[in-house]
Amino acid sequence: MNAPHPDPTGPSEQTNPKDRPARLTVGVVGAGRVGPALAAALSLAGHRPVAVSGVSDASVRRAAALLPDVPLVPPGEVLARADLVLLTVPDDALPGLVAGIVETGAVRPGQLLVHTSGRFGTAVLDPARRAGALPLALHPAMTFTGTPVDVQRLAGCSFGVTAPDELRLAAEALVIEMGGEPEWVEEAARPLYHAALAIGANHLVTLVAQSLELLRAAGVEAPDRMLGPLLGAALDNALRSGDDALTGPVARGDAGTVAAHVAELRAHAPQSLAGYLAMARTTADRALAHGLLKPELAEDLLGVLADGGARRDGEADR
């Protein structure tokens, strides 16, 4: 028997979410930063969290903060209690988890199994599907803190969604009820989709943290205050204009300035040099391709970048 599909109307369209039909009991396997927040959002939409599993002290604290009064139980018990189970474990652990719950007979026919991995589509859930489960891949394109603020941040958040055709409406409904916006991603495109998000979000954190570190080393007392407006404007411009938003010495072809940067980083922050060179080369390539960097200026610039990398390699060999 198929599990009831949630009502696709948004939470604001009815006065009492709990009065809507097809409310689901919800379980969470893996009380990391994502699962409890999604379960809390589903609770606001009228669904009922009934069980959560987690091992570490941090997981227990997150579950208590976001899902108060929801019992902490083993994964098998979560599946026994819930119509909809959120599998929110690290990507590399997901295939093993799916195999394990199938081998123990914990999966029930008609049960909705939802994983939140960006890397995988629904194929990773095939063992559970053969046992009768209904598979969904719902990946929120957001960074999570593990605190109640995450529930509010889901409003307007895009979800990378992959689902069988017969479950598309159910997938859309769940995302909308959590406050999100569904964005359909084909099974084969999931790794590329996830790589794109990692470049944009995870690498951004690394770049910002590195910039803060270097500004402190340069004697700036409030680097966060200095970077905030600059980075906010750069992000807004990039989202609006893509490569046309490129500015700075690489896009201008200022080889002398870039050479000075390389020398300073080699002397004072050698751990930052490789990242600078890699990003500068990529920026130069994109600026050239989009007509922002003049070809006659590119040769000297690329020479500086090549020399910077060659010196670094030579120094590492000595």
Image (cartoon, rainbow, N blue to C red):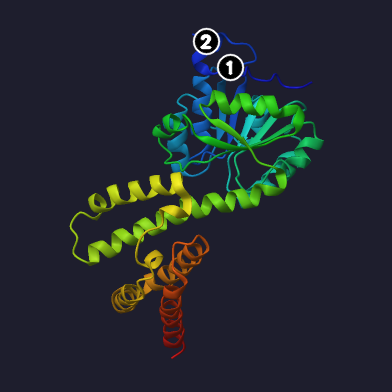
Q: Residue at left 56%, top 25%?
A: 176
Of the pair 30 and 2, the residue shown nearer to us: 2
Residue 177 visible to the viewer: yes
- Residue 266 in the image: state x and y as whole percent: 34, 78
Asked which quadrant contains residue 51, the reply is top right
Asked which quadrant contains residue 173, the reply is top right
Task: Report helix, strand or loop for mark 2.
Answer: loop
The number of discs equals 2
Q: Residue at left 44%, top 62%?
A: 292
- Label 1 crowd bin: few (<14), some (14–19), many (20+), radius 10 Å: some
Of the pair 306 and 157, the residue shown nearer to us: 306
The answer to whether the residue labelled 2 contacts the one labelled 1, judged by CB atoms less than 8 Å apart, is yes
- Label 2 crowd bin: few (<14), some (14–19), many (20+), radius 10 Å: few
In the depicted structure, whether residue 47 falls above or below residue 231: above
- Residue 274 in the image: state x and y as whole percent: 43, 72
Of the pair 43 and 76, the residue shown nearer to us: 43
Task: Report helix, strand or loop for mark 1.
Answer: loop
Image mark for residue 99: none
The type of residue carrying mark 1 is Thr
Image mark for residue 9: 1
- Residue 196 in the image: state x and y as whole percent: 56, 52
Image quadrant holding the N terminus, namely top right
Image quadrant holding the C terminus, namely bottom left
Disc 2 versus disc 1: distance between alpha carbons?
Answer: 8 Å
Of the pair 129 and 165, the residue shown nearer to us: 165
The type of residue carrying mark 2 is Gln
- For this view, does 218 lie left or right of residue 184? left
Residue ranking furthest to the right: 130
- For this view, does 313 lie left or right of residue 214? right
State the residue position of label 2: 14
